[in-house]
Image (cartoon, helix red, strand yellow):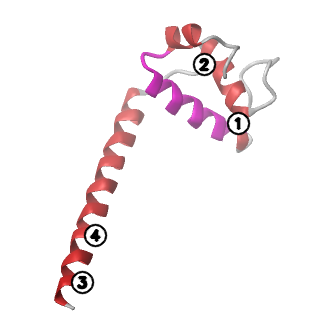
Amino acid sequence: MISYPSIDKLLDQVNSRYSLSVLAAMRAHEIDDGDSKMLTKYESPRSVGQALEEIADGKVKVDPSSILSERKAERVERIEETKLEHQEGLENKKD
């Protein structure tokens, strides 16, 4: 469970829990990949906690277009999976 930063402080910076989780995950991956850190001192030793601290401090902002693009990509992926499952089902009926 997160104790610092508080969820209230985080939601002051981001408009939804979904956006917060996406933003924190993306930033944590950047930190893990060696991206420079935005604060001089962190409470958390983990990249996700550090990402949340950066968000709470206003150093990281949501790019709405990236979240919309991600949602669209997920929808396209689900549609493609459904098509593939349907095709496989038709092929199995032929046998």
Rendered residue at 76%/32% (across/down): 46
Rendered residue at 21%/91% (across/down): 95
Crowding around mark 4 (Cα neighbors within 10 Å: few <14, some 14 to 19, many 20+) is: few
Rendered residue at 36%/48% (across/down): 74
Q: CA distance from mark 1 to mark 4?
A: 36 Å
Direction from residue 60 to residue 79 in the image, left or right: left
Identify the residue under disc 2. Answer: 55
Rendered residue at 41%/35% (across/down): 66
Give the number of the mark in front: 4 or 2. 4
Residue 44 in which image quadrant: top right
The region drawn magenta spans 14-31
Q: CA distance from mark 3 to mark 1?
A: 46 Å
Q: CA distance from mark 3 to mark 4?
A: 12 Å
Q: Which mark, by number, is residue 92?
A: 3
Which element carries disc 1, helix, strand or loop?
helix
Q: CA distance from mark 4 to mark 2?
A: 39 Å
